[in-house]
Each structure stands twice: as C-alpha cells, then as structure tokens.
C-alpha cells in the first residue's frame, strides 16, 4: 500500500461509527446561515483580528524597545519567537479544554488572557519581564485560534465551510493592517520613544471588551452539544495522547507537516518584507496595505474555491503555484508600480492561500479531539515556521541578497505545500461528527 493510500485510509477510519469519510450534498437549506452562526463567526473573527493586531504591534516597536533596554536585534527578535513558540502551549491547553467543556469558554478565557498580558507588557521594567510576558501572551494567542475556529465552523453549514474558513483567517490580516495604520498615524503623536511603545502595547487591553460580548451573546457549538447530548465522548478519552494513537497518528503527523509548509511560506513572504521595501528607499505602508488586502481577498477566494470540484488540495495547488510564479514582480522589479502589483498578487496567491487551512484542519479530526487536533497541528506548524525568518537571515549573513534569500525560501515552501497536501485525503464535504 503506497503512502498516499495509507494516509487517506487511516484518516478516514477514525473511531467508528462517529468519524467516517463522507461527502455531504448541499441542499438549499444547507446554505442557510443562522444569526447564531453569524455571532459565533463575529466572535472568532474579531478575536483573531485583535490577536493579530496585538502581535503585529510588537513588530513595529522593536527598535524603540531595543533602545529602551539596550539590547541587540537578536534579543529584540526573540520577543516574537518566544510568542510563536508558546502559541503551541496555548493551542494544546485550549484545545483540550474546548473538546471537553465546549468551545465558547476557552475562547473567552483566551481573549481575556492575551488581552491582559499584552496590556501588562507595556509596564515591563526590564527586558526579562517583557520576554516572560510575551511568552504568556503567546499562550492566549494560541488559544484564540484553537477554540474560536471550531466554534465558528461548527455553526456554519457544510456547503459554506470553505468560505467561512477563508473569512475567519482574513481576520489576522485585518489586525495587521489596523496595527500598521495605528502606528503610522498614531505613533508620531507620542514623541518620547519609550512612552510610544508602551502606550501602543497598552492598547492590548481593548480585546477584553470582545470577551465580555462573546460571553453574553455567543452560543456553544451545536456539533459539540449534539455529541454530548447523544452520550458521545467530548474530549475525555485519552486527551492529548489520543492524537498519537494508531488510528489518528498519521493524521496528526501529516496535518502538522502540511501546516508547517503553509506557515513557512507565509513567514517567507511577510517577515522580512518591510526590511526589503525599506532597503529600497520606499515607504512600507502602501506595500503592507496591499499585501494584507490581497491576503484578505485570497483567504476568501481560495476558501470558496475549495468548496468546488477543485477541493482543498486543488485550491491549495492553484494558489501556491500562483505565488511562486509571482516572485519576480514581488521581489525583483525596480518599478514601484510593478512592486505594488506584486504585493497585491502575492497576498492573494501566497499569504492568502492559508484561508482554506482552518476548515481543512477541522475536517481532519473527529469531534472528540477536533479543537485539540486542529489547534495542535496548527501551532506545531507555527513553531516550525518560526525558524523561517532565522533561515532567511542566515542566508543574508552568508552574503546572499535578501530578495534572493526570500525567493528561495518562498519557492521551497511552496513546493512543499503542493507535494505534501496531495499525500493526504481530500476533505471537502466531510461530515463534522
């Protein structure tokens, strides 16, 4: 039995009879989105948007932080790395809680958590305290994605699952753009460098208001409630160890590899891009806006396309191939108009291809470990991909031009996506039971 058939077979079998691979044919009623579904979507979307806002805000103030604490660039960059690594802790913790006690409360607590530690980061008296607080922030950041995505996706009809997946993932790009605008227009109003970065981090308290709204207005996942009402297991059997039992181990490993490839491409595209633009003597704001606008468009386009005959694998292949083909206009042109077009196109095809991933990951795991499985594999991918900026930096330190280093890593990551996603099953239309 070849590798592709092995992964597909093991992924489909699951703990029968609750987890089987089946294709759901949509009827008109299958496409009706209820008010409860929209509220769940709003909570997950805004939680992820404000999460992206708070995390991205740090990247804009690293120079001021380095000046305040007299640290080098490596230690400043480590503030981002430790956040990404600790997202895995939050993903595992919130995932286990979401599968056992429901999706809503872990989402609410995760929003409160990252909001509190983002706010406290602004009071850090030393670099060591700031480092610890950003690690704790990462736990909440991981929890929001892990609990929020299944809460929203399980409310929506199967026929629209790919679309809502893309819409949800675009929240991070919205937060990125919001942070860029706040820094661009608000930072000059605070002339003192130390007060500036502290006040921008204090804005992290705002998401706590969303947590209060979610607590009062959002309903629990109907899929999770139905499972509990039928007397089925809700995350109690095996917990984290369940992901590594014989029937789910191939799924866990494969989903982790695929997600790592997607996120490696994302960080190859985005992390060093402001530096690349600035090195050419250009203002970064319009390029970042177009890149993230393209990402939002791409999230929706590829999530929607994944609901057609192309499926999740076909949509990933088309989008990723487009991103690789767009590398010349993204990195190597000397014409500003071409580079702006490249930012938009790369956002749509490259960073935007991640829009199909939330739905894809949630379809890979049964309800008993859906939040934990999707959250764990997503954040394993984030932890692996956190080394992509380091890899590009190492190539540059070795004498390679930044644009070429980014291009090599983009092409390599893109190729890995196309290869690995076809080694697993097509999940379009899979029943979330």
Image (spheres, grey):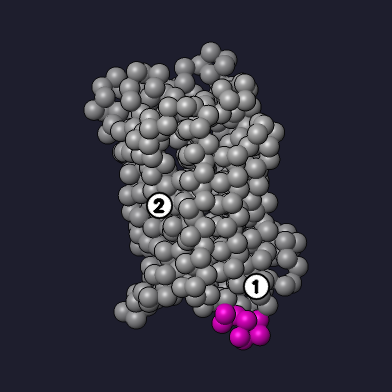
Question: Does 277 sit left or right of 60 as displayed?
Answer: left
Residue reaching furthest to the bottom: 230
Q: Position of residue 179 (x, y in %)?
A: 42, 41
- Within the magenta stretch, is there residue 227? yes
Q: Is residue 24 positioned above or below 383 on the image? A: below
Q: Quick one: 10 or 202, which is closer to the camera?
A: 202
Q: Which mark is residue 170?
A: 2
Which disc, if any, is residue 109? none
Q: Is residue 268 left or right of residue 295?
A: right
Percent x, y of residue 372 = 64, 62
Residue span colored magenta? 225-232
Please name the predominant secondary structure of the magenta segment in the image.
helix
Is residue 10 something that shows in the picture? no
Q: Residue 101: which numbered mark, if any? A: 1
Picture coordinates of residue 247 (x, y %)?
69, 65
Q: Secondary structure at mark 1?
A: helix
Instruction: Give the residue displayed 46% in from the left and 63% down from the top.
Output: 43
Measured along the vertical axis of the image, is residue 277 above or below residue 112?
above
Which quadrant of the structure image shows residue 156? bottom left
């Amino acid at each position: 039995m070849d590798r592709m058939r092995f992964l597909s077979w093991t992924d489909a079998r699951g703990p029968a009879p609750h987890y089987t691979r089946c294709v759901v044919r949509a009827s008109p009623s299958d496409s009706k989105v209820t008010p409860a579904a929209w509220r769940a979507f709003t909570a997950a979307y805004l939680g992820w948007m404000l999460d992206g806002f708070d995390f991205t805000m740090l990247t804009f103030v690293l120079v001021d932080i380095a000046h305040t604490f007299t640290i080098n660039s490596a230690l400043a960059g480590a503030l981002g790395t430790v956040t990404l690594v600790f997202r895995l802790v939050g993903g595992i913790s919130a995932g286990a809680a979401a599968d056992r006690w429901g999706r809503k409360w872990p989402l609410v607590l995760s929003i409160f958590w990252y909001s509190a530690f983002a706010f406290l980061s602004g009071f850090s008296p030393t670099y060591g305290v700031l480092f610890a607080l950003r690690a704790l922030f990462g736990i909440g950041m991981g929890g929001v994605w892990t609990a929020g995505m299944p809460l929203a996706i399980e409310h929506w009809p199967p026929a629209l699952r790919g679309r809502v997946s893309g819409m949800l993932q675009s929240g991070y790009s919205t937060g990125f753009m919001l942070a860029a605008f706040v820094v661009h227009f608000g930072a000059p109003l605070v002339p003192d460098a130390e007060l500036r970065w502290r006040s921008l981090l204090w804005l992290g308290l705002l998401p706590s208001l969303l947590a209060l709204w979610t607590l009062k207005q959002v309903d629990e996942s109907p899929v999770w409630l139905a499972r509990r009402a039928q007397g089925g297991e809700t995350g109690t059997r095996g917990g984290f160890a369940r992901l590594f039992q014989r029937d789910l181990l191939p799924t866990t490993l494969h989903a982790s590899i695929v997600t790592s490839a997607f996120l490696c491409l994302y960080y190859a595209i985005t992390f060093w891009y402001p530096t690349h633009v600035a090195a050419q003597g250009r203002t970064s704001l319009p390029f970042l806006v177009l890149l993230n606008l393209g990402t939002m468009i791409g999230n929706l386009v590829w999530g929607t396309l994944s609901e057609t005959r192309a499926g999740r694998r076909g949509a990933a292949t088309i989008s990723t191939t487009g991103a690789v083909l767009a590398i010349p206009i993204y990195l190597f042109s000397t014409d500003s108009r071409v580079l702006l077009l490249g930012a938009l196109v790369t956002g749509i095809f490259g960073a935007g291809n991640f829009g199909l991933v939330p739905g894809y990951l949630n379809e890979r795991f049964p309800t008993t470990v859906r939040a934990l499985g999707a959250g764990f594999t997503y954040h394993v991918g984030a932890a692996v991909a956190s080394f992509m900026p380091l890899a590009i930096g190492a190539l540059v330190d070795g004498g390679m031009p930044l644009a070429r280093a980014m291009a090599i890593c983009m092409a390599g990551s893109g190729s890995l996506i196309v290869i690995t996603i076809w080694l697993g099953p097509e999940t379009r239309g899979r029943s979330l039971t």
